[in-house]
């Protein structure tokens, strides 16, 4: 009877132990599964561009479509960085932009790509900053994109892009008085990880122990805190 009771009492503990091991295994395997799935989709997408040509010729060689597509993209890259090739591409684009439906689709996609490209090439966008909102001691994290001076206001304004969680490519553009912008020591990568993960992935180094922004009259805006409250829109 005593052995039966001990077995009965230990059963929930063993089930809980196995459940924890199962959850740990799932958490470890999820990044690997997602990575392999993305690589598989990427391989299939790239391979499907050129593989039909080889199939029509009766050639069935694994990876031939991928190699051919990558060579074509490499050739386009050389053309885009060459004067003659750039002129050919511009003429081809002018023809595409004359097609009613295709023009809107092609133009929109190209504009989006150019925007992302300009963001990556901009040195100002690599600056991470905090914007005081909605109350003292609470901050929105964002990326500085530029500055301007409005004569009507009489002081310099800083343009800050406030990304949303978990998609950092959407957000709000605000112009705030430069003296109220709190500079951050975080890198663009650290800030992006914090935004995408909703704060679950924290930087290796702790946040500053205090953040104080000064208003237009030189007074302190916000209060010192042991750890500032950081939020994303």
Image (spheres, helix red, strand yellow):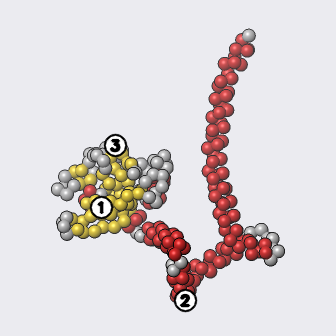
**Horizontally, is 21 left or right of 107 in the view?**
right
Task: State the mark number for residue 187.
Answer: none
Residue furthest top in the image: 1
- Alpha carbons under labels 2 and 3: distance apart: 59 Å
- Alpha carbons under labels 2 and 1: distance apart: 41 Å
Task: State the mark number for residue 226.
Answer: 3
Q: Is residue 233 above or below residue 78?
A: above
Residue placed at 27% from the left, 64% from the top? 157
Task: State the mark number for residue 175.
Answer: 1
Contact flag, marks 2 and 1 (Cβ < 8 Å): no
* Sequence-earlier tag: 3 or 1: 1
Residue furthest left in the image: 217
Question: Toward the viewer: 50 or 207?
Answer: 50
Residue 56 visible (yes or no): yes
* Sequence-earlier tag: 2 or 3: 2
Residue placed at 65% from the left, 78% from the top? 72
> Dot 2: few (<14), some (14–19), or many (≥20) neighbours within 10 Å?
few
Label 2, secondary structure: give it: helix
Residue 179 location (% of width, % of height): 25, 59
Residue placed at 67% from the left, 27% from the top? 14
Residue 106 visible (yes or no): no
**Horizontally, is 28 left or right of 190 in the view?**
right
Contact flag, marks 3 and 1 (Cβ < 8 Å): no
> In the picture, which quadrant includes the N terminus?
top right
Question: Toward the viewer: 232 or 220?
Answer: 232
Label 1, secondary structure: give it: strand
Residue 59 location (% of width, % of height): 81, 74
Count of marks, rendered view: 3
């Amino acid at each position: 009877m005593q052995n039966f009771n001990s077995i009965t009492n230990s059963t929930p503990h063993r089930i809980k132990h196995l459940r924890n091991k199962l959850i740990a295994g799932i958490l470890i395997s999820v990044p690997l599964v997602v990575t392999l799935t993305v690589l598989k989709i990427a391989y299939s997408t790239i391979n499907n561009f050129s593989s039909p040509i080889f199939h029509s010729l009766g050639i069935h060689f694994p990876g031939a479509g991928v190699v051919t597509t990558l060579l074509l993209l490499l050739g386009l890259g050389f053309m885009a960085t060459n004067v003659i090739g750039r002129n050919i591409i511009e003429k081809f684009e002018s023809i595409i932009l004359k097609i009613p439906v295709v023009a809107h689709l092609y133009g929109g996609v190209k504009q989006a790509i150019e925007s992302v490209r300009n963001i990556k090439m901009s040195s100002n966008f690599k600056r991470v900053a905090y914007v005081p909102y909605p109350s003292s001691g609470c901050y929105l994290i964002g990326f500085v994109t530029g500055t301007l001076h409005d004569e009507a206001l009489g002081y310099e304004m800083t343009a800050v892009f406030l990304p949303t969680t978990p998609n950092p490519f959407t957000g709000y553009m605000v112009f705030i008085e430069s003296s109220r912008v709190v500079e951050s020591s975080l890198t663009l990568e650290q800030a992006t990880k914090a935004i995408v993960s909703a704060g679950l992935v924290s930087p290796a180094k702790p946040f500053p122990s205090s953040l104080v922004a000064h208003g237009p009259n030189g007074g302190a805006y916000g209060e010192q805190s042991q750890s500032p409250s950081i939020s994303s829109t």
